[in-house]
Image: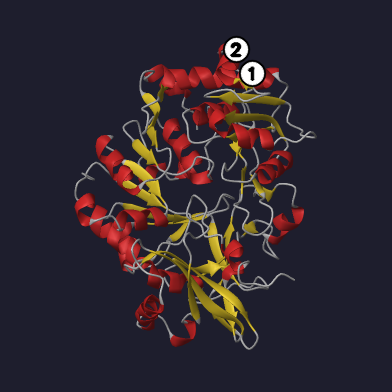
Amino acid sequence: MYPGKWAEIAPDRLAVVMTDTGESLDYKTLDDRSLKLANWFREQGLQFGDTVALLATNSVQHFEVFWATQRAGLYLTAINFHLLPAEVSYILDDCQARVLIASADLSDLAKSSIGADTKVEKFLAYKGSIDGFDDYDATIEAQEAKELADDRSGKTMLYSSGTTGCPKGVRLPLSGESVKVDGGGGVASMQPIFQFGEDTHYLSPAPLYHAAPLRYSGEMQAWGGTVFVMPKFDAEDALRQIEKNKITHSQWVPTMFVRMLKLPEEVRAKYDMSSMRCVIHAAAPCPRDVKQAMIDWWGPIIWEYYAGSESNGSTLISSEQWLAKPGSVGKAAVGVMHVCDDEGNELGVGEIGKVYFELETPLFEYFNDPEKTKSSRHPKHDNWSAIGDLGYVDEDGFLFLAERQSFVIISGGVNIYPQEIEDALTMHPSVLDVAVIGVPDPDLGEVVKAVVQLAPGVEASDATVEELMEHLRGQVAKYKLPRSIDFMDDLPRTQTGKLRKHQLRERYVPAK
């Protein structure tokens, strides 16, 4: 998992390009600057297993910092720049960062996140200045590009989205191997299937503080491809970039699919998608209608995987398999999959339970949270772990997800899985976004509520409520129908499309 060889073989090949400005790094420059930064980390006393934090909007510098930490045996914590200062401050303290690197367009957030008692020792700013921060470019240029005597591989330590209290850092054990020979983990194992290589043009439309965009983009550079980074997702611009840059590989989340599918037909037809060979999606459940429409549009080149930042196992499914098993997220690709009840007993075909993966390699931990780490482990097997999702397997071993365990609605003692209702509403022409939650009810304990963000021009009215209810009556069982539908201007989602349902429920659940 190392792009240094491309600096020798193809020094002028572009490693990364920003789609908005055209700013880029070739492999020689990426190698030199990341090596100089790695030397600076060593000069500041950072040792194997220490942490560097990055607070930045999407940029080419992400990859200088990423590869500097990878080759210096450090953890990189990329921080969500949509967080509040107190939330950023919490992560800086919790991850025990010794260095903070920030982009100057986040100057106010960076400064207001640093308290008087911060443990951060060094501060660097790029693309402008931040009071109290040293200049990133000047710091790098003052260093030699000399090989490190100890180049053991580092990893990312990224934080959960924090939908249930404080976010937790997912800490994977360091291999202790040289960055030049480290296997790269689960992403690298997908290379024979996805066919990353020197001719790869990979489009990354999501924020680089998330696990998949950062790790997959790094993996593309390990295989010598070029990463095209969008500053932020825009549906039509994504299509424009595919055509302009002859994108071969890309990765998306379902909400991006929905936004592109809801573009006018004449807009979608303007752009040539024929360069794409492999389209990957994950991060959130994809409604069946959406997935089918994407395969119809882009062809059977769409792969879906199910995995978490915890890298505790994964599944994988091709377009052809999905068409035979619509709604599935595939068979186990990394690890051995088990579906278990609350006591840890394995369940049979078609029975819904918690999804565990069994691995022989050391498992992740939630940093500074041994209780959460313990709760992720199987009650009887230390090398089985779960990240909170429920699902079932069919007779052929294909996994179908039901819901996050914490989002299941229990109404009158019956489990209702919100995803099924959300899927039924997602592609309705009046709906731009939808979330289904359980709200308290004195008789049934909980009842179903749908919260809808309407498409532009659609009126929030009783008539619209009835239109949506009539649509649902033909799609889900009567006991699953929402007791009410509310409208919101925007639903709370992370930048990778995950609904912040706990944040949404707080609007309806009385404070205790």
User: Quick check: 372 left or right of 218?
Assistant: right
The residue wearing badge 2 is: 143
Across and down, in percent, residue 110 comes to 64, 34
Give whichever of 454, 224 is nearer the camera.
Answer: 454
Residue 413 appears in which quarter of the rendering? Answer: bottom right
- The residue lying at 63 percent from left, 89 percent from top is 443
Q: Residue at x 35, y 41 (%)?
A: 195
The residue type indicated by label 2 comes to: Gln
Q: Position of residue 507 (x, y in %)?
A: 61, 67
* Residue 339 pos. (x, y %): 56, 68
Task: Using the image, determine if residue 77 lies above or below residue 165.
Answer: above
Whether pointer 2 and pointer 1 mark residues with C-beta atoms closer than 8 Å, the reply is yes
Tag 1: amino acid: Trp
Chain-order first, disc 2 or disc 1 = 1
The dot on residue 246 is none
What numbered label is drawn on residue 40? 1
Q: Is residue 59 found left or right of 272 in the rendered image? A: right
The crowd level at tag 2 (other Cα within 10 Å; few <14, some 14-19, many 20+) is some
